[in-house]
Amino acid sequence: MTNNDILKKLRVALKLRDDDIVKILSLVDFRISKSELGAFFRREDHPKYMECGDQILRNFLNGLVIHLRGPMPEKKSKVISKKSKTDKNFSTSKPQKKSNN
């Protein structure tokens, strides 16, 4: 199965138009025109047929994830001190001596 086949099947399964695919690719800052996109959906024996490269399919899949799930939230960096009060090894009291009773 070629990249063109995968792209065609995803377009049909998700009911995407060329405009939708161009917008999905723009989500990952990948620019493509509708005519370039149309060349991927032509038959292999057509004179203007073009093979869909790995980079285009990869960017489409990454854009599709963003389109369906939404953008990833930004990660907040946590500042963790060396000895936190929630740390199990941290104790403010002195260790107790064992009695021999």
Image (cartoon, rainbow, N blue to C red):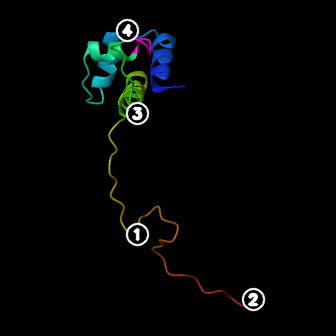
Q: Nearer the viewer, residue 91 or 32?
A: 32
Of tags 2 and 1, the one toward the viewer is 1
Observer-nearest residue: 74 or 6? 6
Q: Report the residue marked by disc 2.
A: 101
Q: Is residue 95 above or below residue 45?
A: below
Residue under label 1? 83
Count all numbered tags in the image, as a single digit.
Answer: 4
Q: Earlier in the sequence, mark 3 or mark 1?
A: 3
Say if 41 sits above or below 91 in the image.
above
The answer for how far apart the CA atoms under marks 4 and 3 are is: 21 Å
Please report whichever mark, 4 or 3, sits nearer to the chain's N-terminal start. 4
Give the SS element for disc 1: loop
Q: Residues within 10 Å of mark 4 (few under 14, many from 20)?
A: few
Say whether marks 2 and 1 touch (CB < 8 Å).
Answer: no
Q: Earlier in the sequence, mark 2 or mark 1?
A: 1
Q: Which residues are magenta?
A: 41-46
Q: Residues within 10 Å of mark 3 (few under 14, many from 20)?
A: few
Q: In the picture provided, is 85 more to the left or to the right than 73?
A: right
What type is the residue that disc 3 sits on? Asp
Q: Position of residue 60 (x, y in %)?
A: 38, 26
- Nearer to us of marks 2 and 3 is 3
Distance Cα–Cα, label 4 vs label 2: 83 Å
Q: Which residue was labeled with disc 4?
A: 17
Viewport quadrant of the N terminus: top right
Residue type of the residue flagged with mark 4: Arg
Q: Secondary structure at mark 2?
A: loop
Give me the residue at 32% from left, 58% from top.
79
Closest to the camera, between mark 4 and mark 3, is 3
